Amino acid sequence: MCDILTEQLQHYTVLWRETSALYEEWAKRHALSYYELLVILSIMNPDGPCLQKDICTHWQLPKQTVNTILKNFAGRGWITLVPSAEDRRGSLFHKVSSKELKKII
């Protein structure tokens, strides 16, 4: 049983590394960081606006990193940041220039 779990864990680790490498290459081709690409994938989610903390939780990214990326995207005109009515500490964001973002996706 332990051997099977160890083998499965090793297989998962290899797949995770290969997938991460693909995302990193994709980001590089669009002059983005790996983390910026992950945030864009969250932004392009068809479920509509979400909170910054949702991105942090989903991708296990530091809050400050996501905050910096979102402010950068807002500066580019890709999104607008709106304070959350439920939690003033959090920000909702809305896609503005999905044309630019769709070029990446």
Image (tube, rainbow, N blue to C red):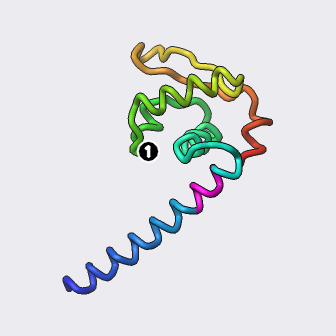
Q: Which residues are magenta?
A: 22-27
Determine whether 41 is above or below 19 in the image. Answer: above
Q: Can residue 45 be seen here?
A: no
Residue 6 is left or right of residue 62, and the answer is left
Few, some or many C-alpha atoms within 10 Å of disc 1 (few <14, some 14-19, many ≥20)?
Answer: few
Determine whether 99 is above or below 41 in the image. Answer: above
Dominant secondary structure (helix, strand or loop) of the stretch shown in magenta: helix
Q: Can residue 22 be seen here?
A: yes
Residue at x-position 19% and y-position 83%: 2
Residue at x-position 78% and y-position 44%: 103
Please give the residue where the numbered disc 1 appears in the rendered image: 58
Task: Find residue 59 and report its horizontal and vertical position in percent.
Answer: 44, 46
Of helix, strand and loop, which one carries label 1?
helix
Residue at the extreme left? 2
Q: Is residue 26 magenta?
A: yes
Name the kind of residue labelled 1 in the image: His
Q: Is residue 98 magenta?
A: no
